[in-house]
């Protein structure tokens, strides 16, 4: 059972990694066979399909992240592979989006100036880099389930990752989400489909933050409430005071 759990966790991680890399090309409109932007027509069916795909991801990603759901879920899924299963289902939701996304045509903006293109692609790259760095600052392998299955394989008890004081978390509470915003909005070509994606995911991010911070306040109490008072959510503040440590939680 321990070997199977380890192999399962490793497979889920590899599927996530492939999905993450595909997402870069899909959103950036290069290399991948399916892309966020492209030729298409605006119609009710296509918009409905896109909203359904985004809704599937949002519901899976948020509902399965809530403590109450996890307590129920682990009655059927072994605790050591709960996180890996969550990561796998998140990847499946994204794969569905990649496969069935409907381009809508209609250009909102198209930047051709070389400097403008360079700046926007620079922001795009910065966003993905910030996302990746943020995961490692808060323990990448715990976030994606590998630490859990590894500890189980070695017959060692699991304990929550302690709070630390990683760099960008001193400036804002959610650098990982800020990275997603850069990745979704920084593009030289913004089509209607891309705008729909960016607006919907941005709304989802701010809703998710509210639920996530509610859970963190319940789990950490006054420590996290004090942190929220000192450190901005997304936009750094020039009047920042020394912060307490924090970490992103799903």
Image (cartoon, rainbow, N blue to C red):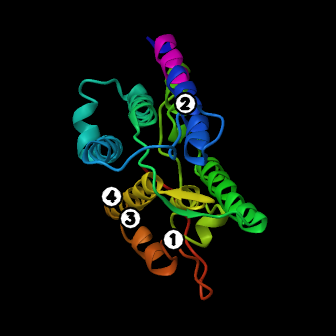
**CA–CA distance in space, label 1 to label 3:** 10 Å
Q: Looking at the picture, how far across and down is residue 37, in whole percent?
A: 51, 47
N-term mark: 2 or 3: 2
Residue placed under numbered mark 3 in the picture = 206
Residue 146's disc is 2
- Alpha-carbon distance for marks 2 and 3? 28 Å
Secondary-structure class at tag 2: helix
Q: Earlier in the sequence, mark 1 or mark 4?
A: 4
Mark 1 / mark 3, whichever is N-terminal: 3
Residue interval drawn in magenta: 3-10
Q: Say if residue 176 shows up in the picture.
A: no
User: Would you place residue 190 above or below residue 151 in this image?
Assistant: below
- Neighbourhood count class around disc 2 (C-alpha, 10 Å): few under 14, some 14–19, many 20 upward: many
Residue 108, position as x, y percentages in the image: 49, 63
Q: Residue at x 67, y 64 (%)?
A: 167
Looking at the rendered image, the disc whose residue lies closer to the viewer, 1 or 2, is: 1
Task: State the count of labels.
Answer: 4
Query: Can you tell which of label 2 and label 3 is closer to the viewer?
Result: 3
């Amino acid at each position: 059972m321990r070997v199977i759990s380890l192999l399962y966790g490793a497979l889920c991680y590899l599927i996530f990694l492939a999905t993450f890399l595909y997402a870069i090309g899909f959103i950036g409109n290069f290399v991948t066979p399916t892309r966020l932007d492209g030729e298409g027509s605006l119609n009710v069916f296509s918009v409905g399909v896109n909203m359904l795909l985004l809704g599937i991801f949002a519901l899976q990603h948020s509902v399965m992240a809530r403590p109450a759901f996890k307590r129920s879920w682990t009655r059927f899924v072994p605790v050591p592979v709960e996180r890996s299963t969550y990561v796998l289902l998140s990847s499946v939701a994204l794969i569905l989006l990649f496969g069935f996304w409907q381009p809508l045509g209609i250009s909102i903006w198209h930047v051709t100036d070389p400097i403008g293109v360079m700046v926007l692609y620079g922001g795009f790259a910065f966003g993905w880099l910030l996302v990746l760095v943020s995961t490692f600052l808060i323990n990448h392998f715990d976030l994606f389930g590998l630490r859990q299955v590894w500890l189980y394989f070695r017959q060692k008890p699991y304990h929550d990752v302690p709070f630390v004081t990683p760099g960008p978390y001193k400036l804002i509470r959610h650098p990982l989400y800020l990275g997603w915003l850069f990745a979704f909005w920084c593009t030289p070509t913004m089509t209607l489909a891309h705008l729909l994606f960016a607006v919907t995911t941005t709304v989802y991010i701010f809703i998710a933050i509210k639920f996530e911070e509610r859970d963190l306040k319940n789990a950490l109490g006054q420590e996290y409430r004090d942190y929220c008072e000192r450190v901005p959510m997304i936009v750094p503040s020039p009047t920042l005071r020394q912060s307490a440590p924090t970490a992103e939680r799903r």
